């Protein structure tokens, strides 16, 4: 039997964790794909802080909103 198990390398949570986002993502390149729920991100009080932090990095942001869990087809598109 053969299988592959992939885990998320880092999970940050707790009060103020969203403020760490720019520092955490800047090492991964110059483009960001952010996938959010249909309306959850837009209703988030920290939305502006998160987007301003990303904008300060001068990275290209692709912001996609979807309903339900994302499929691999949606992500690979």
Image (cartoon, rainbow, N blue to C red):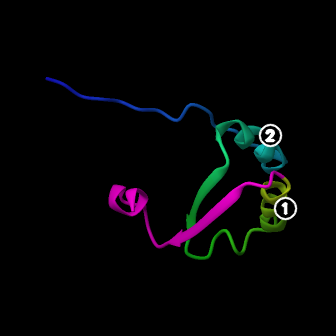
Which portion, as a residue range, is magenta? 57-77
In the current view of this chain or complex, which residue is farthest to the top?
Answer: 1
Disc with the residue nearer the chain's start (2 vs 1)? 2
Q: Does dot 1 land on a helix, a strand or a loop?
A: helix
Horizontal and vertical percent position of residue 1: 13, 23
Query: Looking at the image, which is closer to me, 64 or 13?
Result: 64
- Quadrant containing the C terminus is bottom left
Horizontal and vertical percent position of residue 28: 65, 39
Residue appearing at x 56%, y 69% in the figure: 64
Horizontal and vertical percent position of residue 68: 44, 68
Horizontal and vertical percent position of residue 11: 63, 37
Query: Looking at the image, which is closer to me, 21 or 60?
Result: 60
Residue 59, magenta (yes or no): yes
Residue appearing at x 76%, y 46% in the figure: 21
In this image, 68 relative to 25: left or right? left
Rounded to the nearest angstrom, the CA distance separating label 2 from label 1 is 13 Å
Q: Is there CB contact under 8 Å for labels 2 and 1?
A: no
Q: Which residue is mark 2?
A: 23
Residue appearing at x 70%, y 36% in the figure: 27
Q: Quadrant of residue 25?
A: top right
Identify the mark at residue 3; answer none if there is no mark.
none
Q: Which residue is mark 1?
A: 52
Q: Does dot 2 land on a helix, a strand or a loop?
A: helix
């Amino acid at each position: 039997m053969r299988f592959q198990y992939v885990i998320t390398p880092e999970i940050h949570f707790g009060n103020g964790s969203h403020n760490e986002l720019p520092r955490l993502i800047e090492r991964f390149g110059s483009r960001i794909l952010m996938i959010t729920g249909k309306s959850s991100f837009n209703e988030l009080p920290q939305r502006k802080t998160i987007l301003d932090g990303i904008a300060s990095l001068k990275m290209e942001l692709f912001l996609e909103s979807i309903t339900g869990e994302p499929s691999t087809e949606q992500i690979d598109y």
